[in-house]
Amino acid sequence: MSRAGDSWGRWPLPKDQRLWPLRRRDQPLPADVRPLLAYGQGRSYGDSCLNDGGTLLLTRGLDHFLHFDPGTGVVACEAGATLGEVLEIAVPRGWFLPVVPGTRLATVGGALANDVHGKNHHRAGSFGDHVRAFELLRSDGSRQVLRPGDALFAATVGGLGLTGLVTWVELQLQPVAGPWMQVESLRFDGLDDFFALSAESAGSHEYTVAWVDCLARGKALGRGHFLRANHAAPGAAGQAPGQGLSMPVTPPVSLVNRLTLRPFNALYYHRQRARRRAAVQHYSPYFHPLDGIRDWNRMYGPNGFLQHQCVLPPAQARDAVAALLGEIGRSGQGSFLAVLKEFGDRPAPGLLSFARPGTTLALDFPHRGPGVFALLERLDAIVASAGGALYPAKDARMSPAMFRAGQPRLDAFIPHIDPAFSSSFWRRVME
Ligand SMILES: Cc1cc2nc3c(=O)[nH]c(=O)nc-3n(C[C@H](O)[C@H](O)[C@H](O)COP(=O)(O)OP(=O)(O)OC[C@H]3O[C@@H](n4cnc5c(N)ncnc54)[C@H](O)[C@@H]3O)c2cc1C
């Protein structure tokens, strides 16, 4: 099991953290164990959910539902409830989360603090766009109910947990006919096809995303599978999701290496003979395939792994994605999961929100020593020269300059920070 107080990438490991479980939302914050940082489920990959030398306020005990109106789809719950718990209550009553990231194990508070995005960003924007209100507890003991339009609302949505503790959140859900998704998978041959498919699907499909074979080179550069989906119409039904598997122990070495990566990527690309395949699928394996393998992060071995997720402005995206994939292909340090998606152009609700108009590429790399850090810096240079940004929720090593360059509203955010809150990430990028 992943340990409370760790991050999902398992690098860096936390040092000298005090864990402070919260049990009630009216509980005062501890006074003498600062700096403080809320911690949900540690589904952030790097150090944005870590607080070396400080205290993590474990929110998972705050998992009560305050109200749910099946007539309007307005739900309010404590911030430690997981997105999966919201779905369990909402879906049988004909409602669905408006934005879901690739894991249902994130908490509502964590989803708000990283203003997470899903495969429907081009239609629905990010998580914060659907938050109607939340309560923020500050270290001076004050509690404020914040709504869109409030300055502290925009600072807290995507605010990396630095403005205080969110105790409960009220969300607007979206109506659905049932738990089924109408999914289509299209094999494509290269990056130009990806952009053409994204443009073609944006109007017809609520959810779009692509998996890319990041070790293919030459003409095959950027080949992959494009997945597009809608919530299925009433009456549709497919196969119920099976029981999950789990990674029983952390193997002594990473199972993700040169020997496994190339065949995995090639096999995945060729898994579908037909160019197009359509199916009705339950929402759970469609949105959260990795949650089906509990603790899959362990397969990277005891040194953990690093994720690199960038967003690239529309005009530079095509060439910059090609440059990133070219660099990775040459390095031979591929990724098991290379995910490509075009964001929509809705303005972000948070001052530090990551999702913005452009194309996002997410890649995982096993931590195999200095070589991977050198590669990630080369990738950063490509992102920086294209005017892009990295996602703090996935980061464990970007430089302060890279962070600042990706955050044009940083100066407006800083005055809203609660002086008793901080994180390992924040101290690293603000040094
Ligand atoms: C398999 C997988 C797939 C993912 N897919 C996506 C994706 O598609 N899109 C995406 O955007 N992200 C994705 N993520 C990242 C994940 O959704 C975010 O990192 C999310 O914030 C994790 O939530 P958490 O509850 O685990 O929060 P944690 O990781 O524990 O904390 C994250 C941040 O939220 C803050 N925080 C948590 N609770 C509170 C609170 N109550 N009050 C104030 N601040 C709080 C913390 O201080 C920290 O800064 C994925 C992660 C995994 C493991």
Image (spheres, rainbow, N blue to C red):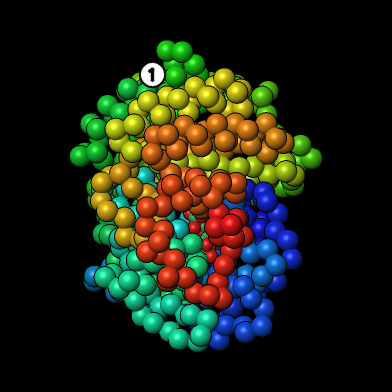
Q: Is residue 252 above or below residue 59?
A: above
* Residue 61 can be seen, yes or no: no
Q: Is residue 269 above or below residue 287?
A: above
Number of numbered markers: 1
Q: Is residue 241 above or below residue 328?
A: below
Q: Which residue is mark 1?
A: 189
Report x, y in % for residue 92.
36, 62
Question: Which residue shows up at 50% across the image and 19% down it?
Answer: 216
Q: Amino acid at mark 1?
A: Asp
- The residue at the far left in this view is 203
**Res 359 quadrant in image:** top left
Ligand 1: does it lie within 8 Å of the C-beta at label 1? no
Secondary-structure class at tag 1: loop
Question: Which residue shows up at 66% across the image and 24% down it?
Answer: 258
Question: Which residue shows up at 32% across the image and 22% down it?
Answer: 192
Q: Quadrant of the N terminus?
A: bottom right
Q: From the viewer's perspective, is 20 left or right of 272?
A: right
Question: Which residue shows up at 57% across the image and 82% down it?
Answer: 29
Q: Quadrant of the C terminus?
A: bottom right
From the viewer's side, name the closer residue of 48 and 249. 48
Q: Is residue 425 above or below residue 36?
A: above
From the viewer's side, name the closer residue of 37 and 258. 37
